[in-house]
Amino acid sequence: KTFVLNYFSDKDEIWFVGDKCEVNGNDKELYDAIKAIDSNRAHATKSVEDTQNIIKKYILKENHE
C-alpha cells in the first residue's frame, strides 16, 4: 500500500484511516508511513461509525459532540 505514496508530493495533504493498523495488519505499513509524515493525519479505526467520526472531526473539521 505504501507504493501509492510515490504519487504524492511533499506538499500534498495526505490522511489515512484504517482498521488493520496493528502488528501484522495490512494497513500498518501505510499507517506508519503517514504517521511519520504527520502524526495527526494517521488514524486507526474500529468501526464504520468510528471512521465517520474521525473523518468528520479531523479531516472535515466538523464540530460534533
Image (tube, rainbow, N blue to C red):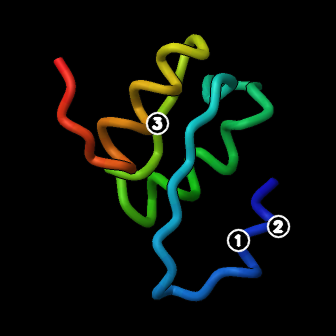
Structural distance between the alpha carbons of marks 2 and 1:
5 Å
Is label 2 in contact with label 1 (beta carbons under 8 Å)? yes
> Does 31 sit above or below residue 7?
above
Amino acid type at image mark 3: His
The residue that mark 3 highlights is: 43
Instruction: Name the image quarter holding residue 64.
Output: top left
Structural distance between the alpha carbons of marks 1 and 3:
17 Å
Amino acid type at image mark 1: Leu
Structural distance between the alpha carbons of marks 3 and 2:
19 Å
Instruction: Name the image quarter holding residue 24.
Output: top right
Within 10 Å of disc 3 (Cα), the crowding (few <14, some 14-19, many 20+) is many
First-in-chain label (3 vs 2): 2
> Residue 43: where, in percent of width, then height?
46, 36
Element carrying mark 3: strand
Q: Could you tell me which residue is drawn at 47 percent across and 17 percent down? A: 50
The residue that mark 2 highlights is: 3
Residue 5, numbered label: 1
32 or 14: nearer the eye? 14
Q: Could you tell me which residue is drawn at 81 percent across and 53 percent down? A: 1
Instruction: Name the image quarter holding residue 3.
Output: bottom right
Q: Nearer the viewer, mark 3 or mark 2?
A: 3
